Amino acid sequence: MHELGETRSRNRRDHHLQTPDTFVRTPLPCLSGGLAVVHAAPVIGCNFAQYTVEFGAGGELRPAAGVNRFLYVLSGTAALSTAVGDHRMTRGGFALVPADEAHLLRGDAGARVAVIERVASAGRGRVIVGTEDAAPRAPLMGDPELQVSTLLPEDAGVDFAVNTMTYQPGASLAMVEVHVMEHGLLMLEGGGIYRLGECWYPVRAGDFIWMAAFCPQWFGALGKQPAKYLIYKDWNCHPIAGTEVRR
């Protein structure tokens, strides 16, 4: 039942929090046999797009012209076909497909896939397919309670990075971060408290957060299970890149 207009979702100048109770499903020109929940797009001032595809029977996601595309399987099974081969992807499987690379993603009914797209500005990259379990993993700033899995190598020929970060209960970022990179963040497991600008929000699995450049940010995990999120940032690009769409 709708709670009389109440929601944890918030939309601010330098960030927004989108919670599942406010998700709106929409068709996309590149998607058939499924719907998408659009979390972030340049209309809010960001320099990328992020959405979750929910596949029905016979669902297919086709290329979008001119964008580098990152895929991460949230649940179910999907099959990715590219010029370099076919790949069966399950939960935690991911892929990077460079702009204008011919490909097709077919999802089994009920499969959910996180999609991140950025207009190509770096040199042409290569198709990368992997699994989170096999990705390099290291503690952040020496804290063993906070592990970062690096999904994309720095030589991928694309100007963004995607990682997962896992916090043991009670773990937190060692500092309030304020930096030129913007973020798209999808909570995968657990929950905690996120500081965004001058606001503090309870967050949990299923929530999405966009953080603009230089938005003060900090997270601490709460509860009895680890907290984990998938996080995007623009990376390895000049500070004036994308200024036409930044706020």
Image (cartoon, grey):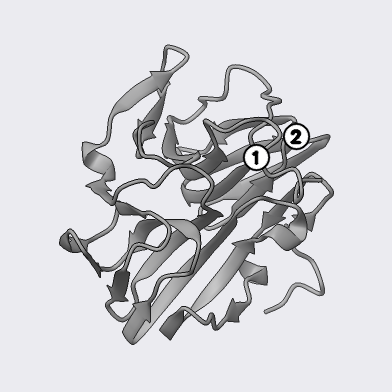
Locate residue 178, reporting x and y percent.
Answer: 71, 25
Q: Quadrant of residue 233?
A: top right
Q: Can you name the residue that lies furthest to the top here?
A: 142
Locate residue 177, reporting x and y percent.
Answer: 67, 24
Q: Can you name the residue that lies furthest to the left here?
A: 85
Other residues around mark 1 within 10 Å, as few (<14) / some (14–19) / many (≥20): many
Locate residue 168, reporting x and y percent.
Answer: 43, 29
- 139 in relation to 1, above or below: above
Looking at the picture, which amino acid does disc 2 mark?
A: Cys
The image quadrant where one finds the N terminus is: bottom right
Label 1's element? Answer: loop
Look at 58% across and 79% down and name the residue there. Answer: 25
Q: Nearer the viewer, mark 2 or mark 1?
A: 1
Locate residue 126, reporting x and y percent.
Answer: 30, 48
Q: Nearer the viewer, residue 164 or 146?
A: 164
Look at 68% across and 44% down and name the residue there. Answer: 242
Q: Is residue 226 visible?
A: no
Tell me whether circle 2 and circle 1 mark residues in contact (CB < 8 Å): yes
The image quadrant where one finds the C terminus is: top right
Looking at the picture, which amino acid does disc 1 mark?
A: Glu
Q: How many marks?
A: 2
Q: Is residue 116 visible?
A: yes
Label 2's element? Answer: loop
- Position of residue 136 in the picture relative to residue 161 (left or right): left
- 113 in relation to 12, above or below: below
Residue 215's mark?
Answer: 2
- 141 in relation to 208, above or below: above
Look at 54% across and 83% down and name the residue there. Answer: 27
User: What separation in Å lies between label 2 and label 1 (alpha carbons)?
Assistant: 8 Å
- What residue did someone put label 1 on? 182
Q: Quadrant of residue 207?
A: bottom right
